[in-house]
């Protein structure tokens, strides 16, 4: 168990979004050779608001709507958080494009229940 902040979880999500943000922005494929584009605050908020794998309470924590500043999580919860963030970042609904080529990489990820706060 360890204590983590909202900022830490946002950093994890940001890294997941970077994988596919160029698809969502409709940037040409040769974009990789040019530069790494940072995820904007608006894109991060949109990602949090639309991710179906997180509970409303967890989304509120991520958006800074709760007074809680630090939460205690298990390693399993942290891995589940990252797994669900990657799954949404590669979802065609989020990217607004066909991501079937990436689906093979994440085919073993089964999302059943919304991830809730760890308490």
Image (cartoon, rainbow, N blue to C red):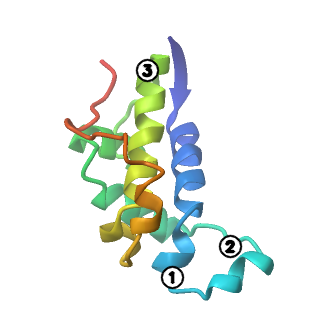
Closer to us: mark 2 or mark 3?
Answer: 3
Q: Nearer the viewer, residue 36 or 104?
A: 104
Instruction: Answer with left or right where residue 30 lies relative to residue 12.
Output: right
Element assignment for label 3: helix
Quarter of the figure that contains the C terminus: top left
Is the Cβ of the residue at disc 2 closer than 8 Å to that at disc 1?
yes
* Residue 70 in sight here: no
Q: Which mark is residue 25?
A: 1
Residue at x 56% of width, y 42% of height: 7
The residue pinned by badge 2 equals 37
Residue at 36%, 62% (x, y): give it.
91
Residue 41, position in %: x, y? 52, 66
Q: Nearer the viewer, residue 25 or 72?
A: 25
Q: Earlier in the sequence, mark 2 or mark 1?
A: 1
Instruction: Say what secondary structure mark 1 lies in.
Output: loop
Q: CA distance from mark 3 to mark 1?
A: 32 Å
From the viewer's perspective, is 113 left or right of 101? Answer: left
Please tell me in which quadrant of the rendered image residue 90 appears.
Answer: bottom left
* Spatial CA span between label 2 and label 1: 10 Å
**Which mark, by number, is residue 76?**
3
The image shows residue 114, relative to residue 95, as above or below, that is above
């Amino acid at each position: 168990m360890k204590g983590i902040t909202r900022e830490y979880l946002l950093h994890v999500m940001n890294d997941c979004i970077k994988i596919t943000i160029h698809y969502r922005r409709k940037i040409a494929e040769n974009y990789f050779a040019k530069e790494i584009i940072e995820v904007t605050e608006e894109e991060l908020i949109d990602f949090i608001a639309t991710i179906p794998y997180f509970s409303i309470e967890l989304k509120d924590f991520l958006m800074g709507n709760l007074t809680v500043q630090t939460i205690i999580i298990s390693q399993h919860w942290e891995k589940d958080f990252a797994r669900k963030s990657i799954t949404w970042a590669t979802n065609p609904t989020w990217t607004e494009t066909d991501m079937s080529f990436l689906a093979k990489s994440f085919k073993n990820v089964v999302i059943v229940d919304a991830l809730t706060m760890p308490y």
